[in-house]
Structures are given as structure tokens and as C-alpha cells.
Image: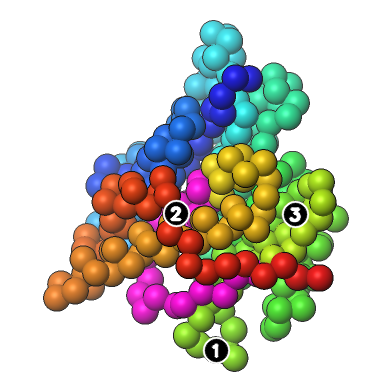
Amino acid sequence: MDSPKVLSIQSHVVSGYVGNKSAVFPMQLLGFDVDFINSVQFSNHTGYKFVKGQVLTEKELAELVTGLTENNIDSYSHLITGYIGSPSFLKEIANVYSKLKDKNPNIIYVCDPVLGDNGKLYVPQELIPLYQNLIVPIATVLTPNLFEIEILTNIKIENINDIWKAIDFLHEKGCETVCVSSAEFSTNENTLCVFGSSRKGNPVKVQIEIEKIPASFTGTGDLFSALLLCFMYQTESNLKESLEKTVAVVQAVLKKTLAYLEGKEMEPKNKELKLIQCKDEILNPPVIYRATIID
């Protein structure tokens, strides 16, 4: 394969920046060809008062992929998935991966296992064993948050040692690289930690401590996973450098979004990520926070 080409299966919103709307633009800007399938098509994300739109079925997903296969346009270097709302659709994702891997045995699967946050599930309970037993073993890269890695591993995380234990558990299940985004510990309420571990080539564990931004935004996880995919490719799987760049871009986008919010109501339409306005930062990540290699 001459150049990186991604199949992104994520949600789509007409207005705003989540799912594919948050992931596709930065990947394209960084030089990746991106084909995308919209698992849902909604007017806006679910944080708004009203949401209208359609949900793609697993049968429709299979039809789209069959069309790609029959036309011999199904060669991809990467597959990336985000929010999946039903068990049947998640099972079809595994089928899609299997077909793409038949075409390219070296395909990299980046999975953001969107299950929930802050102790609350966003998806049906039935998805949990499917992620644990079907998706984790085939994913190359996993990007769970703190709540999600607890669910995936059944390990209660109370300290940093627990995080490494949970990450090692996912490695043992077959996942090559695991990055835990935005882990918060009560020891310092003003900072967040990002953890990364890779068993590819020379195994490495890294940790980045970053300043906590005093607001929550939708779409940051989708952006994080897409950027990590790109920078891991560009750096030839240098996890330390890739995480530093990923964190730098996400922080820059959040700070620009927060600056825009000054003097405005904290309502969903004003909190949409200022992604397009950060194209320079995506191309040249302003790295401030450096990762520490953990022995």
C-alpha cells in the first residue's frame, strides 16, 4: 500500500464536532486518505435538548462494505471505530475487520471503546462482553478512558499501579498498544494523566501529566484516537512522541474552544470544538507537556 488509507466507522452529526466530524478532518489534514461510514446520522450530538436522525443497521453496514469489496476498493492501512450503539452492529464491525485483514494482513485497528464516563454507561450492558471477548483481542490500539478500562478489565482503579495492571491485562488479551486518556486522581485535582503502553518492537510505558481544563467538551475522545493513529504512523510507532503530539493538539483545541466561550453561555452550541480554527496546531503540534518513560 503506497500511502495510508483509513476506514473510519463512527457517528456523524450535521452540526458540531463529534465522531467522524471530529476525526476525519485532522486525519485528512495530516495526509491520510479517509473513507468514512457514518454509524448514525444525527442533527447534533446527544448533549443537546433535541436530537433527530437515523441509525445505520448492521445489514446496511455489511452492504456498504460488500460494495467496496466487489469493486476492489477495500484496501486499508487502518480501521478506526468509535461509538457503537448496539451489539449486532459491534459484531458486524468484527466481521468487517476480518474482511479487511484478509485483504491487508498488516491492517492496524484503532478502537475507541466508547462505553461511558464518570461511572455512567452510555451503551447497552450487552456490549461489554462483546468488547471484552471479541474486540479487545483484535484491536491493535485501544484508547479507553478510566471508567472504560475498569469495565473492560473488571479491575477497580484506585491508583496508578492499578492502571498499569489493567493495561497489562489488555495486552495479555492481545491488544498491542493501550492509551488511557484523561485519568484523574484525587491527589491533584488540577491535573490529568494520560498513560500509554506498547508491546510492539521495544516495549515502552509512558505517562504525561497535563493541566486540567475547567470545562468538559464532547468529541475530544474521537479527536484523541484519530490523532494518535496519525502520529503513531508518522513516528513509526514511537509512542512517547505520538502521545506528546496528540495531547498537544487536543489541549490546543480545548484552549481555543474555551477562549471562544468567554462571555458566552455554557450551552452545547457554544462548546463545539474549534477544530477548523486549529489546523495549524494539528499540522505542527505545540508540544508543552513531555511524557515520562516508566521503568
Q: Alpha-carbon distance for marks 3 and 2? A: 22 Å
Q: Quadrant of the C terminus?
A: bottom right
In the drawing, does residue 213 fall left or right of residue 145?
left
Q: Is residue 226 magenta?
A: yes
For the point 53% across and 64% down, which residue is it? 116
In the drawing, does residue 191 fall left or right of residue 87?
left
The kind of residue tagged 3 is: Ser
Q: Alpha-carbon distance for marks 1 and 3? A: 26 Å
Q: How is the image coloured?
A: rainbow
Where residue 99 appears, x then y in whole percent?
68, 24
- Disc 3 is placed on an element classified as strand
Q: Circle 3 sits on which residue?
A: 198
Residue 20, visible in the rendered structure = no
Where residue 131 appears, x then y in whole percent?
68, 51
Q: Quadrant of the N terminus?
A: top right
Q: Circle 2 sits on which residue?
A: 285
Q: Is residue 18 magenta?
A: no
Q: Earlier in the sequence, mark 1 or mark 3?
A: 1
Tell me the number on the disc at residue 188.
1
Q: Alpha-carbon distance for marks 2 and 1? A: 26 Å
Residue 264, visible in the rendered structure = yes
The kind of residue tagged 1 is: Asn
- Closer to us: 51 or 26: 26
Tell me the number on the disc at residue 128.
none
For the point 52% across and 55% down, which residue is it? 245
How many residues crowd around disc 1 within 10 Å: few (fewer than 14), some, or many (20 or more)? few
- Closer to us: 148 or 278: 278
- Does the residue at mark 1 contact the one at mark 3 (Cβ under 8 Å)? no
The outermost residue toward the right is 172
Region of the chain picked out in magenta, as a range? 207-227
Judge depth for marks 2 and 1 and give the one in front: 2
